[in-house]
């Protein structure tokens, strides 16, 4: 009796010292926590057995992505993942697990980290169990998920679909390309502002005055760190809504190819020439992808030329050579190819950086802007 009485007193003493112990849900015997997670998280019924904390996930959520882990966001795409997710995480919504399970790695020993919308969200736990049933042997769940990630001031990324929606809806957001200008000039997301990371301080005045304006930085994809660096600098300046588009321009270009950019020039027989077929194709399918320059005399141009062409008579070319762009091909033409060839030679001598071509062909021009190539050389 005495021993039983002592045990009862000890239980009461523990309960008095730790009053929460009686109200917290018991931790299932199978649940295992990381050291920090065990101090802050109480397991719930139905949770997966291996729980990790923010510090653990932070070590693996790197750009460029680590090769030894796959981080999976189990939330729905449009309303959750697209708007903001842990950088580098792929999206396998738990409700569509079977549809997207092919995105999981072939190596079933690779570390998988599932997360979703916090301690009350079961999606990541359910997905983890499904992955385990497929034979994956190294699975963790970040139970605190995206809310805790944000609470600790860690960055989020957005998806291609979300960037497209922002642009389509004309939302008030600054989309910033952190790549060098020479790369930006070759292709960028429409409407993006170019502030190269290496020139951030030089162009900081281009950022919105209102520091609550959402900023989205991107660069050359998951292997590029420029957008992360620039985003960190913007946060340090006091901007309060800064995210990255980690997949960047490569993902955008794949999802929304630019037909103008995709049009390739097929050279003709001689150096610097464009084939007649390529000239026709560009004119008919992607005229804005190149600058067509009529080098005939002004009166010839006025009488008839091809639709969209500008006039720079061969005698004025040297004086006006700075008008020629570097960001798209320049195609010279005339009535027989002679003056067009001279224009090409002049440009290559004075401004070799211009991507110039000429059509070596006899042409007829119509008042409606159409033309006919009667003899191509």
Image (cartoon, rainbow, N blue to C red):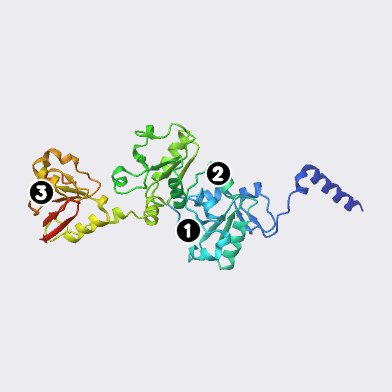
Query: Which numbered disc flags the more N-terminal residue, 3 or 2?
Result: 2
Residue at image x 76%, y 48%?
Answer: 23
3 vs 1, front mark? 3
Left or right of 298, for residue 61: right
Label 3 SS: helix
Q: Nearer the viewer, residue 154 or 56?
A: 154
Numbered disc total: 3
> Along the horizontal axis of the image, is 106 left or right of 324?
right
Q: Position of residue 270 (x, y in %)?
A: 11, 58
Residue 140 rendering spot, x and y as whole percentages = 58, 57
Residue 314 vs 270, above or below: the answer is above
Mark 1 or mark 2, which has the lower sequence index?
1
Q: Quadrant of residue 262?
A: bottom left
Which residue lies under the disc numbered 2?
150
Evaluate if marks 1 and 2 touch, with contact meaning CB atoms under 8 Å apart. Answer: no
Residue shown at 61% from the left, 58% from the top: 125
Q: CA distance from mark 1 to mark 2?
A: 24 Å
Quote the CA–CA distance across marks 3 and 2.
59 Å
Label 1 neighbourhood size at 10 Å, few (<14), some (14-19), many (20+)?
few
Disc ID at residue 345: 3
Q: Quadrant of the C terminus?
A: bottom left
**Front-most of 367 and 156?**
367
3 or 1: tag closer to the N-terminus: 1
Disc ID at residue 68: 1
């Amino acid at each position: 009796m005495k021993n039983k009485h002592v045990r009862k007193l000890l239980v009461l003493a523990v309960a008095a010292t730790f009053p929460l112990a009686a109200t917290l849900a018991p931790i299932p015997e199978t649940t295992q926590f990381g050291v920090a997670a065990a101090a802050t998280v109480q397991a719930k019924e139905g949770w997966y057995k291996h729980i990790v904390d923010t510090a653990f996930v932070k070590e693996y959520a790197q750009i460029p992505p680590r090769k030894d882990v796959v981080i999976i966001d189990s939330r729905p795409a449009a309303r959750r993942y697209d708007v903001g997710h842990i950088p580098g995480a792929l999206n396998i919504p738990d409700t569509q697990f079977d549809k997207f399970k092919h995105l999981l790695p072939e190596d079933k020993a690779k570390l998988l980290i599932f997360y979703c919308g916090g301690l009350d969200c079961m999606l990541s736990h359910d997905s983890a169990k499904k992955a385990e049933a497929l034979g994956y042997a190294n699975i963790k769940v970040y139970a605190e998920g995206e809310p805790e990630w944000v609470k600790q001031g860690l960055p989020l990324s957005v998806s291609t679909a979300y960037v497209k929606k922002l642009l389509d809806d004309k939302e008030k957001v600054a989309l910033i390309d952190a790549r060098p200008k020479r790369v930006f000039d070759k292709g960028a997301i429409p409407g993006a502002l170019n502030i190269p990371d290496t020139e951030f301080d030089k162009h900081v005045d281009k950022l919105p005055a209102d520091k609550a304006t959402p900023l989205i930085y991107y660069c050359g994809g998951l292997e590029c760190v420029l957008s992360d660096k620039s985003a960190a600098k913007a946060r340090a300046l006091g901007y309060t809504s800064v995210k990255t588009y980690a997949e960047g321009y490569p993902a955008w270009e794949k999802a929304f190819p630019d037909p103008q950019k995709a049009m390739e020039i097929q050279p003709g027989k001689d150096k610097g020439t464009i084939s007649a077929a390529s000239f026709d194709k560009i004119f008919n399918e992607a005229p804005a992808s190149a600058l067509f320059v009529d080098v005939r005399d002004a009166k010839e141009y006025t009488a008839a030329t091809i639709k969209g062409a500008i006039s720079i008579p061969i005698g004025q070319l040297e004086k006006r050579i700075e008008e020629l762009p570097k960001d798209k091909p320049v195609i010279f033409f005339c009535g027989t190819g002679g003056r067009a060839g001279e224009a090409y030679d002049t440009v290559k001598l004075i401004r070799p950086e211009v991507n110039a071509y000429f059509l070596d062909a006899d042409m007829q021009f119509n008042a409606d802007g159409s033309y006919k190539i009667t003899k191509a050389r």
